[in-house]
Amino acid sequence: MSLWAVLLTGLFAGGASCAAVQGGLLAGTVARRQPEPATVGPGQPRLPAASPDRKNDAVPVGAFLAGKLAANVLLGAALGLAGSAVQFSPSVRAFMQIVAGTLMLLLALNLFGVTAVRGLVPSTPPAWARLVRRSGRWGNAFAPALLGVATVLIPCGVTLSMMLLAVASGSAVAGAAIMATFVIGTMPLFAAIGYAARRSTTLMRGRLGLLTGAAVLVAGLVSINAGLVLNGSAFTLSDVWRNVTGGATPTPVAAAPVAADGVQRILIEARNSSYSPAALTVRAGVPTELTLRTNNTLGCTRYIIMESLGVEQSLPATGDTRIDLGTLEPGVHRYTCGMGMYRGLIEAVA
């Protein structure tokens, strides 16, 4: 799942789905800083409160969001580090992507009002929710920031799926980037809630709720597709979409003839957003050497996974990386980038 998809998930899904609890805490923090209506004497009606200071409101909102971002970055790094420590195989990472995507689909159905799935959507333990609510009553200057940090104790379902993706990344940097990008995506709605809690909540329950469901649905399908691609599956959702829309499939390119030393050598260029050629035809039963070429290449294509051949290789930004594939068995050997976004295949024919 790309960081762009994570950002959009946070923008449309994370803010709205988590705002039911976390947004209420933020709104309560801002409300407690508003001036109270003044009285002029016993039995006299209260005078209207002074107009709230927007700059003063920005302090708790900014502190809350900063605390939330910092806590989730650290959490993402820890989760990614944990994933790296246990060295999940591509199959396990693919499974976690599919689980995360399935969780998002359930959340989307719940947002669409399908009551049958409500019991399947993860919820926060009540004790954790009460702990964070109590922290919102603190009156010191650091309360909003600490409250933002404490929100990691009450993650919504979309946040849980992002946490799974952070673990599946197997990298502290990638895990931190996933959680940071997700939280940044949630910030606009949380900021709006901080300034206008009632109106934001109303919007969230109306059309914004439907938009949120659609965004979560798309994000879930993207995550499931990435998991299928990572697992080397012959069936993927992107293939279904291409067949429905009439998209073009890559035309296989024949490999160079077998060299005098009896080895067939093939070359694949890892570009920023594709592999070229995306489909190769080689001879089965012949020793094969693969060269992966990069040229100022950025992004996930620099990490290639060939599940059926047991290859998992990190590539330099620029240079040639040679991999001995051994003697290929007849069949299709699929490969993908480390995030399941870009892929290709090598077909060995007798």
Image (cartoon, rainbow, N blue to C red):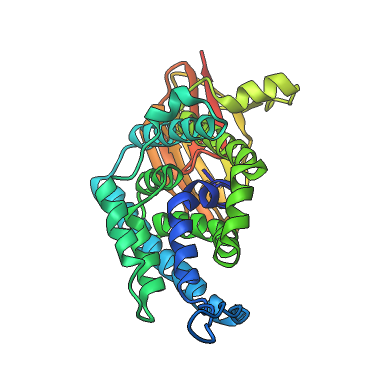
Question: Furthest-bottom residue in view?
Answer: 40
Tell me if residue 255 can be seen.
Answer: no
* Residue 184 pos. (x, y %): 53, 61
Front in this rendered view, residue 286 or 47? 47
**In the picture, residue 100 is in which quadrant?**
top left
Q: Nearer the viewer, residue 311 or 202?
A: 202
In the image, is residue 114 above or below residue 295? above
Residue 161 at what x, y percent from top left?
A: 42, 42
In depth, the one of 7 and 195 nearer the eye is 195
Q: What residue lies at 45% left-to-right and 30% top-to-bottom?
A: 102
- Residue at the spot x=57%, y=34% of the render? 217
Label tally:
0
Residue sitting at x 40%, y 62%: 73
Q: Is residue 156 left or right of residue 272?
A: left
Q: Is residue 78 left or right of residue 13?
A: left
- In this rendering, the answer to whether 279 lies above or below 204 is above
**Where in the figure is residue 89, as x and y percent of width and height?**
32, 37
